Image (cartoon, coloured by chain):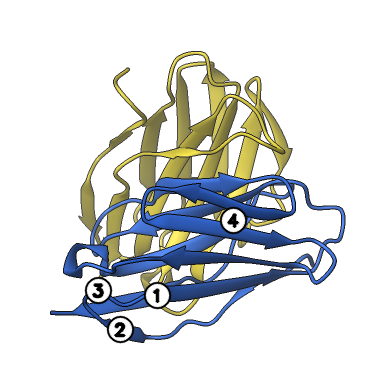
Chain colours: A yellow, B blue
Amino acid sequence: DAGVIQSPRHEVTEMGQEVTLRCKPISGHDYLFWYRQTMMRGLELLIYFNNNVPIDDSGMPEDRFSAKMPNASFSTLKIQPSEPRDSAVYFCASSPGVGGQPQHFGDGTRLSIL
Amino acid sequence: QKEVEQNSGPLSVPEGAIASLNCTYSDRGSQSFFWYRQYSGKSPELIMFIYSNGDKEDGRFTAQLNKASQYVSLLIRDSQPSDSATYLCAVNNDMRFGAGTRLTVKP
């Protein structure tokens, strides 16, 4: 079991640039989650997918954020254009189910927008 | 908005003492509850889960659930400096986490 794999581990870019974060969930997990963590707001759920379909995107902060899951083994979170306030650690997690199944987290992407 | 509330701490206990971490939730229909530990600079990792009222023990850790009062707690017995971390409570019906409680165990 390779675990949830995220890339890149660190990203530093200038304001206004497009940022793409990537995630490979654990094979066989039907649910994929994107979280953002900051000191001020803690761990926030941005969006989650079930069988590649977005189920709840109410946590996506604004239209600059978008997420896709083209297949069961890959998801992206895109920010365009990026702003300094987007600086945070972004975690991807996967789970075999919800309402009773724990989530397995990737190592996160530390994003800094200058 | 369904809420998961935790005391952000920091909570400081001496080595060998019992650390008590608490979490309250707003959704009465919640069925599953999880405690994650997060070391600084690392990702959250699951340490305990509980579904039924009462206590669940796993080694030095005990999770306690009281659905009538809508709280779940985590007790860490014989606390060790290696337990120093942020502890996150999660209510899995809506996949949301509390803000976390930062625990420091002093040698």
Dot 2 falls on which chain? B
Disc 3/disc 1 C-alpha distance (Å): 9 Å
Residue at image mark 1 = B19
Classify mark 2: residues with Cα within 10 Å, few (<14), some (14-19) or many (20+).
some
Disc 2/disc 1 C-alpha distance (Å): 7 Å
Q: Looking at the image, do the residues carrying marks 4 and 2 touch, with CB atoms under 8 Å apart?
A: no
Q: Looking at the image, do the residues carrying marks 4 and 3 touch, with CB atoms under 8 Å apart?
A: no
Pointers 2 and 1 within a single chain: yes
Q: How many numbered discs sit on the rendered protein?
A: 4
Disc 3/disc 2 C-alpha distance (Å): 8 Å
Q: Earlier in the sequence, mark 1 or mark 4?
A: 1
Relative image position of residue B45 (x, y in whole percent): 38, 47
Dot 3 falls on which chain? B
Q: Residue B43 got which mark?
A: none
Disc 1/disc 4 C-alpha distance (Å): 18 Å
Pointers 4 and 2 within a single chain: yes
Dot 4 falls on which chain? B
Residue at image mark 4 = B90
Q: Earlier in the sequence, mark 4 or mark 3?
A: 3
Describe the element under mark 1 as helix, strand or loop.
strand
Classify mark 3: residues with Cα within 10 Å, few (<14), some (14-19) or many (20+).
some
Residue at image mark 3 = B16
The amino acid type found where label 2 is placed reads Val
Describe the element under mark 2 as helix, strand or loop.
strand
Residue at image mark 2 = B13
In this view, the residue farthest toward the left is B107
